[in-house]
Image (cartoon, rainbow, N blue to C red):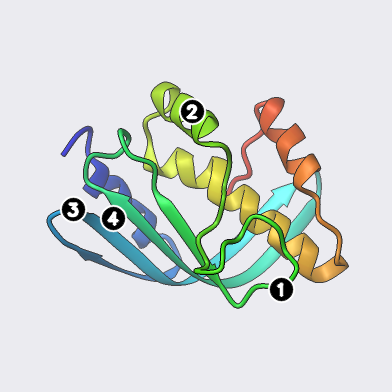
């Protein structure tokens, strides 16, 4: 296992979340209720989402899969099995080559998607262009 993935996952689980972890020979499965409080230019998105993250032990060489459950029917970027398209494969590979951290991956991709989902549920408007613009400017949404 490279660079301390298990310690980063433990750090993530130690935060005030209601997530549980199981591991096997291939990787880690993190699932449960993800309690979030995200801020972008003064707009606070707070809530809870039922999620699952699968992370292979060879991370960052492999891209984690993120699943979200109980989402609005018409939201984009969620496949029928609940797997979320967080970004293009190329964008995530490039990012992980530059920032091989599980915690930073969560902040960059998972939190940005959850922020978008929260906004959609409250206002019925997709803001993926805003989030993409944030990413291009180097913003991170911090828990």
Q: Relative to 80, does residue 107 appear above or below in the rendering?
A: above
Which residue bears the numbered disc 1?
Answer: 72
Mark 4, Cα crowd under 10 Å, few <14 / some 14-19 / many 20+, is few
| Helix, strand or loop for disc 2 | helix
Instruction: In the displayed orientation, state which residue is furthest to the left.
Output: 25
Image quadrant assignment for residue 48 = bottom right
Q: CA distance from mark 4 to mark 2?
A: 22 Å
Query: Which one is in front in this view, the residue at disc 4 or the one at disc 2?
Result: 2
Q: Which residue is mark 4?
A: 10
Residue at left 38%, top 54%?
A: 12
Instruction: Give residue 26's mark.
Output: 3
User: To which residue does mark 2 refer?
Assistant: 95
Camera-near label (3 vs 2) is: 3
Give whichever of 63, 48 is nearer the camera. 63
* Mark 4 vs 3, N-terminal side: 4
Measure how far apart labels 4 and 1 are at the Cα level. Answer: 30 Å
Q: Are marks 4 and 3 in contact (CB under 8 Å)?
A: no
Using the image, determine if residue 52 lies above or below residue 141.
below
Q: Nearer the viewer, residue 54 or 30?
A: 54
Residue at (47% x, 24% y) in the render: 94
Q: Nearer the viewer, mark 2 or mark 1?
A: 1
As helix, strand or loop, the secondary structure at mark 1 comes to loop
Query: Is residue 5 rendered to the left or right of residue 17?
Result: left
| SS for dot 4 | helix
Q: Residue 130, located in which quarter of the rendered image?
A: top right
- Going from N to C along the chain, the mark reached first, 4 or 2, is 4
Image-based side of 22 in relation to 37, left or right: left
Q: Are marks 4 and 1 in contact (CB under 8 Å)?
A: no
């Amino acid at each position: 296992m490279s660079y301390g993935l298990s310690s980063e996952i433990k750090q993530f689980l130690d935060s005030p979340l209601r997530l549980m972890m199981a591991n096997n020979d291939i990787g880690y499965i993190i699932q449960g209720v993800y309690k979030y409080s995200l801020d972008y230019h003064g707009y606070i998105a707070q809530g809870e989402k039922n999620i699952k993250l699968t992370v292979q032990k060879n991370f960052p060489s492999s891209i984690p899969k993120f699943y979200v459950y109980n989402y609005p029917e018409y939201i984009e970027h969620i496949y029928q099995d609940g797997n979320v398209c967080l970004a293009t494969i190329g964008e995530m590979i490039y990012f992980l080559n530059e920032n091989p951290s599980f915690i930073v991956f969560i902040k960059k991709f998972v939190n940005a998607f959850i922020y978008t989902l929260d906004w959609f549920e409250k206002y019925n408007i997709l803001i993926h262009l805003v989030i993409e613009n944030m990413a291009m400017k180097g913003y991170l949404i911090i828990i």
